[in-house]
Image: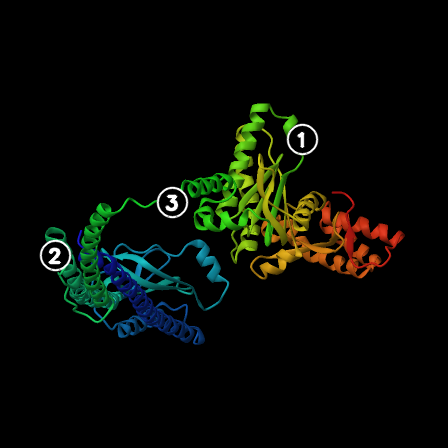
């Protein structure tokens, strides 16, 4: 299909849809407005007639003539005359039916047929409680009289047990709506026709230079005439495209001539000199060794981009800022004891494959496997602005992927895995460490130790992911985090604040956090009595919560034995 019909087929629905919507809304608005006006007029006539009937009855009763038939007949004739005076169109019909189903009054030349059913007994009982009044007003749009559908407004007059109908033919009642719909349809059809014509003209104008360009390309393909040019019709994007095409053919023409000249010079050069050695075998072997060395833990893109720098610098240790992620499978010993060896190996292989894919996806490198643990690095050997963010996102996605993995484990009828993840950022020493027989590219330093300790603390606090304050400060408002605690980890003398990431927590835990924070503030201030009360109150609302239990236990312990030089940091003795 050519591009012109495609443009029409894409744009035409954008024109038709608003037209249809506008026509539909206009129709509904007109119908609603006209119906309301006509219905009010019909209702007004009905109420006017019934008011007149009631006034005639009041006249009889005030003169004590309601029991005299001749006066009643005179009043009814007067009412009939008044009803006829309300008629404004030949299609209107006013009639009354008594309780026996007999027509007692009709303005039409032909008696109404079939006769509408008289009011029900319930209806009469309801209206009987209100003296000398007209009750049980009813609106209907499906009254069939003399094989014609009618709109009718009826009211029940108690003294004479009349049901008085003021009606209009359906077609006459809705004729303004019908005319309005026809007018709207005509306007929409005319608008669509003009739009289609203008669209065809516009599509032709847009595609004309493209067609010329296509013909020029076909001509170049067939004749290899690179001096062919496309006429520039418009000073817009299409015109610039045509200009770029012409410039491309000029450059191709020059390149073609340069290639021919280069080929000629090459033939002459091969006859005059021996083929030069471009790369020495030593250089090739060195590059291949570097690729073999790094290909198992550095992404291929990093190797290709930095092979020269890798060869010169990375084999020597250097200080670098890095983000370290360490994940570990919790209670792995008990899991392994419950599985057959082949099941365990298969599960671990699937688990590591999924986790490593996530690390690679976020531009990290899998530094090493430590039994059932994974150590991943971000920012080495290649740095980027998003290293810290990528590291945290990797941890979040690993936890999300673990849910899918555990569903597979359930289908295989083997135990599920639970992992803890610790993330820290800081200056490390990066390089190849080992001997000539066995070397590993890795990082060493305090940040690695802290990451490992944070991973261990996930079991203590029963949260799946813990990040340090350095990581939290770098994230800013990018992710929602919650302050867990201030701690001194084993091997470190500086207290750090540790955080949980909202995206890894259960909804109940997030709901609990606001209550938890009130008690934690008292705890950090050293007001352990107030902290205890807050944690106890929170436990009533969130029983069994691990964080509340931990801090309540600490508050009780510190009330008995206040810690000296309290700065809010809790020292963890266990690794």
- Residue 333, numbered label: 1
What is the secondary structure assignment of the residue under circle 3?
loop
Q: Position of residue 300 (x, y in %)?
A: 45, 44
The quadrant in which residue 400 appears is top right
Q: Nearer the viewer, mark 1 or mark 3?
A: 3
Query: Circle 2: is it few (<14), some (14-19), or many (20+) Cα within 10 Å?
Result: some
Could one spot residue 30 in this view of the protein? yes
- Do the CB atoms of the residues marked 1 and 2 lie less than 8 Å apart? no
Give the quadrant of the C terminus.
Answer: top right
Instruction: Give the residue pinned by disc 2.
Output: 225
Between the residue at mark 2 and the residue at mark 3, the CA separation in whole angstroms equals 39 Å
Mark nearer the N terminus (1 vs 3): 3
Residue found at x 57% / y 57%? 479
- Give the x, y percent position of residue 332: 65, 33
Which residue is more in the foreground, 347 or 142? Answer: 347
Front-most of residues 427 and 437: 437
Q: Which residue is rendered at x = 67% and y = 30% of the image?
A: 334
The mark nearer the N terminus, 1 or 2, is 2
Q: Earlier in the sequence, mark 2 or mark 3?
A: 2
Q: Closest to the observer: 521 or 510?
A: 521
Q: Residue at x 21, y 71 (%)?
A: 235
Report the residue marked by disc 3: 279
Q: Is residue 456 left or right of residue 212?
A: right
Tag 2 secondary structure: loop
Q: Quadrant of residue 367?
A: top right
Q: Separation of disc 1 and disc 3 at Cα?
A: 53 Å
Q: Give the label, 1 or 2, closer to the camera.
A: 2
Which numbered marker is on residue 361?
A: none
């Amino acid at each position: 299909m050519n591009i012109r019909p495609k443009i029409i087929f894409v744009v035409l629905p954008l024109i038709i849809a608003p037209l249809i919507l506008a026509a539909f809304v206009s129709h509904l608005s007109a119908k609603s407005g006209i119906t309301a006006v006509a219905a009010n007029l019909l209702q007004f006539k009905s109420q006017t007639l019934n008011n007149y009937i009631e006034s005639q009855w009041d006249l009889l009763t005030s003169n004590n003539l309601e029991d005299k038939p001749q006066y009643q007949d005179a009043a009814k004739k007067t009412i009939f005359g008044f009803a006829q005076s309300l008629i404004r169109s030949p299609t209107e019909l006013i009639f009354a039916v008594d309780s026996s189903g007999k027509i007692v009054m009709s303005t039409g030349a032909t008696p109404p047929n079939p006769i509408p059913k008289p009011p029900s007994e319930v209806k009469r009982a309801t209206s009987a409680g209100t003296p000398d009044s007209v009750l049980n007003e009813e609106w209907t749009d499906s009254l069939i009289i003399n094989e014609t559908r009618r709109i009718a407004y009826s009211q029940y007059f108690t003294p004479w047990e009349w049901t008085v109908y003021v009606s209009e033919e359906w077609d006459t009642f809705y004729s303004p709506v019908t005319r309005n719909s026809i007018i709207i349809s005509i306007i929409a059809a005319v608008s669509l026709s003009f739009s289609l014509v203008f669209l065809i003209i516009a599509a032709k104008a847009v595609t004309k230079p493209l067609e010329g360009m296509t013909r020029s390309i076909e001509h170049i393909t067939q004749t290899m005439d690179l001096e062919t040019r496309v006429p520039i019709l418009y000073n817009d994007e299409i015109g610039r495209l045509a200009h770029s095409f012409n410039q491309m053919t000029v450059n191709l023409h020059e390149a073609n001539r340069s290639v021919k000249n280069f080929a000629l010079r090459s033939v002459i050069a091969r006859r005059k000199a021996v083929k030069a050695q471009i790369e020495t075998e030593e250089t090739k072997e060195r590059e291949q060794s570097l690729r073999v060395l790094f290909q198992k833990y550095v992404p291929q893109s990093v190797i290709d981009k930095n092979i020269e720098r890798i060869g010169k610098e990375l084999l020597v240790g250097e200080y670098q800022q890095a983000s370290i992620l360490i994940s570990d499978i919790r209670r792995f010993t008990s899991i392994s004891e419950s599985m057959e060896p082949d099941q365990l190996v298969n599960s671990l292989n699937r688990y590591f494959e999924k986790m490593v894919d996530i690390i690679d996806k976020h531009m990290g490198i899998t530094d090493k496997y430590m039994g059932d643990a994974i150590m991943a690095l971000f920012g080495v050997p290649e740095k980027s602005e998003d290293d810290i963010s990528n590291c945290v996102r990797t941890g979040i996605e690993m936890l999300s992927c673990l849910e899918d993995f555990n569903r597979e484990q359930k289908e295989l009828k083997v135990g599920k895995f639970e992992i803890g993840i610790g993330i820290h950022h800081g200056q490390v020493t990066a390089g190849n460490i080992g001997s000539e027989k066995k070397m590993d590219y890795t990082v060493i330093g305090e940040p690695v130790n802290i990451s490992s300790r944070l991973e261990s603390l996930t079991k203590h606090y029963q949260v799946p992911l813990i990040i340090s304050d350095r990581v939290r400060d770098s994230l800013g408002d990018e992710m929602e985090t919650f302050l867990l605690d201030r701690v001194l980890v084993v091997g470190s003398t500086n207290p750090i604040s540790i955080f949980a990431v909202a995206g890894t927590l259960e909804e109940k835990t997030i709901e609990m956090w606001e209550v938890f924070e009130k008690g934690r503030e008292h705890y950090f201030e050293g007001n352990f009595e107030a902290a205890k009360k807050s944690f106890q109150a929170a436990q009533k609302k969130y029983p069994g919560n691990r964080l509340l239990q931990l801090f309540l236990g600490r508050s009780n312990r510190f009330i008995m034995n206040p810690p000296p030089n309290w700065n809010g940091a809790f020292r963890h003795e266990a690794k």
